[in-house]
Structures are given as structure tokens and as C-alpha cells.
Image (cartoon, helix red, strand yellow):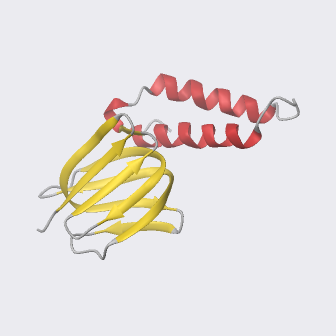
Amino acid sequence: METIKVSVVTPDGPVYESDVEMVITKAQSGELGILPGHIPMVAPLEIGVVRLFKSGSKQEDLVAVSGGFLEVRSEKVTILAQSAERAEDIDVERALRAKERAEQRMRDQKAEDIDFRRAELALQRAINRLTVTGKQ
């Protein structure tokens, strides 16, 4: 089956590079499925999971991204993410602590020094990381 090269890159460097049969990710306009030969496009991404289906197997690689952009060209898909982590690189205990902190901040929203939107985004990122690891 045909494949397309995928790169997931953050300001800290590359996180994932491989040839895959399909990419599924969550853009601000909705979920996108990218196959080889997809039309060129650029789309802003939501906090979510990038699912990468490897060629010749039923295996999928998962990468947690915290926003960014998806660029599709005829020969390559590039995801420029603010932050990204492969499932095997995620510290589950740290993600659980981050989730608990964010939930606590949201419960304490009456305090003047709590930024509710910031706590909400932190909670989304923590849940996303836990989802990728399968620990949610």
C-alpha cells in the first residue's frame, strides 16, 4: 500500500518521523484523515491525539499534541506542534498530577488569582496525555 512521510516537530526538535499509510488528527474544523495523495492544505490543530497507521501492519502510533498546525503536501505531512509526546515517552504519574492540579484550580475558580481558561487548557492537555497512554 502507498505511504506518506510524516514528521511531528516541536520547538525542541523532531518527535516522530516515519512513513505511514494514514494520519488521523483533530483540527479546529473537525477530525481529519490524511492518506497519500491528499490535496495540499494547512490547518490549525486542537489539543488531541495524532493517530499514525504504519504501513504493512495494523499497528498505530499515537502522539499527544497540544495545538499547532498541520501542513499537507503531496509527498509529506508535517505537524508543527507547540508540544508533542509519543505514548511511550509520557510520564503517566506526572500527567495524573497535572490533571489533579488543573481540576483543583477549576474548583477554586472563585479565587481572584485563578485563570479559569488556563486551568481548563491544562486539564485538556493532561487528559489528552493520559488518553494517549491508555491510562484514562
- The image position of residue 39, as x and y in percent, is 30, 77
Residue occupying the point 42% across, 44% down:
64
Decide if residue 57 is on the left or right side of residue 22. left
Decide if residue 118 is on the left or right side of residue 68. right
The answer to which quarter of the image holds residue 38 is bottom left
Image height check: is 87 above or below 28?
A: above
Residue occupying the point 60% across, 32% down:
99
Viewer-closest of 132 and 69: 69
Decide if residue 23 is on the left or right side of residue 69. left
Classify the position of the N terminus by image quarter.
Answer: bottom left
- The image position of residue 112, as x and y in percent, is 87, 31
The answer to which quarter of the image holds residue 32 is bottom left
Residue occupying the point 67% across, 32% down:
102
Q: How many labels, in total? A: 0
Residue occupying the point 27% across, 43% down:
16
- The image position of residue 79, as x and y in percent, is 36, 53
